[in-house]
Amino acid sequence: MYAFVPVWATEQNVSAAVVGLLLALRAAVSVASRVGLTRLIGRFGRKAMLIVSIGAAVLSLAALPLVGPFGAIAVMIGLGLGLGIPQPLTMAWVVSLTASSSHGAVLGLRMTVNRLAQITLPIAVGSFAAPLGVLGIFWANAALLLGAIAVVAGSDAGRPPEAE
């Protein structure tokens, strides 16, 4: 997302300062979204929280190329929720699926794959969706997240971890 927001900003004639404020808002919402997360998980479950939060990111990514700077405020709030909530939930999910002796290695592998995706996905999406412009770029990212929702929906992410 960070790689392509400046492209959106250029098309919308949005200044770099406004882009910085929008990205700061997204980051602040991501951090704030984790406050009370334990209670929300207790009430709605991990799987539902993952699906809803990733869904917020899908809708936000799909909307960004269609809105101006003021609409981008709502988009950044949705992206903050969609990017802030899944990270701790997926880490807990990974830990729940592995033996305690493997937690460090598995979390390290998760972080490595995450960083690899952060490098390769913008290149892949950019080359694939570039002919469609900013619309294609954000919608292709939204489609990737729809795939993540499908994976979560078909998983046992909501099941409590079994005792070792």
Image (cartoon, rainbow, N blue to C red):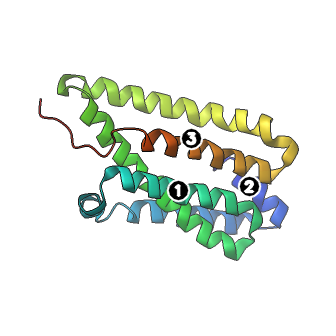
Residue 121 is situated, as x and y percent measured from the top left of the image, at 64, 35
Q: Position of residue 155 (x, y in %)?
A: 39, 38
**Circle nearer the viewer, 2 or 1:** 1
- Crowding at dot 2, Cα within 10 Å, few <14 / some 14-19 / many 20+, comes out as some
Does dot 1 land on a helix, a strand or a loop? helix
Q: Position of residue 6 (x, y in %)?
A: 74, 55
The residue closer to the viewer here, 87 or 3, is 87
Identify the residue shown where x is 70% and y is 62%: 64
Residue 145 versus residue 31 in the image, above or below: above
Q: Is tag 3's residue or tag 1's residue first in the polypeptide sequence?
A: 1
Q: CA distance from mark 2 to mark 1?
A: 23 Å
Q: Which mark is residue 85?
A: none
The first of marks 2 and 1 along the sequence is 2
Label whose residue precedes the other's in the sequence (2 or 3): 2
Mark 1 Cα-neighbour bin, 10 Å: few <14, some 14–19, many ≥20: many
Q: CA distance from mark 3 to mark 1?
A: 11 Å
Circle on res. 6: 2
Query: How many labels were placed on the picture?
Result: 3
| Circle 1 residue | 55
Q: Is residue 153 above or below residue 164?
A: below
What residue would you read off at disc 3?
Answer: 147
Q: Amino acid at mark 3?
A: Gly
Residue at 31 percent across and 46 percent down: it is: 158
Q: Is residue 11 above or below residue 72?
A: above
Which amino acid lies under the numbered mark 1 shown in the image of this protein? Gly
Looking at the image, the residue that sits furthest to the front is 154
Instruction: Tell me: 74 left or right of 150.
Output: right
- The quadrant in which the C terminus is found is top left
Left or right: residue 130 versus residue 106 is: right
Q: Residue furthest left?
A: 164
